[in-house]
Amino acid sequence: MKLLRIVPDNTKFGFMRFRRVSFPFSALASIVAVVAFLALGMNVGIDFKGGTVVELQSKAERADIARIRATAGTLDLGDVEVQEFGGPRDVLLRIGLQPGGDRAQAEVVARLRQVFAADYEFRKVEVVGPRVSQELVQNGTIGVLLAILVILVYLWFRYEWQFAVGAVIATMHDLVLTVGFYALTQLQFDQTSIAAILTIIGYSLNDTVVVYDRVRELLRKYKKLPMSDLLDLAMNSTLTRTVITAVTTILALIVLAIFGGEVIRGFCLAMLFGVLIGTYSSIFIAAPILIYLGVKVGDGVGVAQPAKA
């Protein structure tokens, strides 16, 4: 039986000739991302700026999420998040922090009881203050930085320094552009966004590692091939895998973004951007940067070294 070939085996697309365009483009995009972050800031969610969390349980067999969201939107309470959790009768409401201290938060709960008490039982009410939300911001930031640090240590021990530096630059490139994406689109940034960023970093890094493994394999095989041609060969030989992985992931994310509901739409949109930018950086940043870092065919980089006694 003939195997399906997404990309022909004899494909010889010259990826490396675009490096003189991709590097300035990425530098400009990174500057825009940083400026957007500093000028516009992040549209932080209730997790990071505080608010009231209310758990409801429907007295009927199933909660009407759309109706709850529409009703809560008429109360003029600012940011309101509504999501189903646990069973079909359970609903979680998050209302943004109201000006006026504890009294204002109590009034929010009273208004919710007036509207929903007839059809829903109030199971739990919590107020997340600014101090708690600030701790969540700090913990989320520390979590992302520690994850990146562990990844960088792994890269440093797995590869020669040129490959490690290239992977670090590509990873930071994706992180900066993802933060800029949140700032420009003003998608809500909450704990789910932290999960999206970590997932994007993992996806991008995995793509880069696949490319680098093929580059090292070819460095052992070819001794006189120009470095740019060798990188093009590596890109083309992994192109089928790259296309299949990216397309299947993108299709799944598009379906989730359309039909998954409001709760995960922001996560899916961020992931869509991350998959595209992660695939781009693996091909047009991580690979050609090896040329600028001085990797040359026949200089011993990528060749297995004898074990030390």
Image: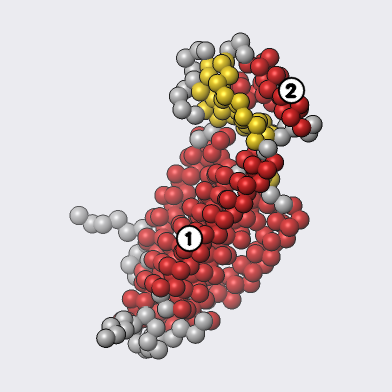
As drawn, 13 above or below 98: below
As drawn, 223 above or below 103: below
Near mark 2 (Cα within 10 A), the count class, few <14, some 14-19 or many ≥20, is few
Please tell me whether mark 1 sits on a helix, a strand or a loop: helix
Where, quadrant-wise, is the C terminus in this rendering? bottom left
Q: Which mark is residue 107?
A: 2
Q: How far is mark 1 from mark 2, CA to CA?
A: 46 Å
Q: Residue at x 62, y 47 (%)?
A: 135
The answer to which of 22 and 130 lies nearer the viewer is 130
Q: Is residue 175 left or right of residue 80?
A: left
The answer to which of 109 and 254 lies nearer the viewer is 109
Q: Is residue 80 left or right of residue 121?
A: right
Q: Residue at x 41, y 73 (%)?
A: 157
Whether tag 1 and tag 2 are in contact, CB under 8 A, the answer is no
Callout 1, which amino acid? Ser
| Nearer-N-terminus badge (1/2) | 2
Callout 2, which amino acid? Glu
Per the image, the residue denoted by label 1 is 204
Residue 277 in which image quadrant:
bottom right
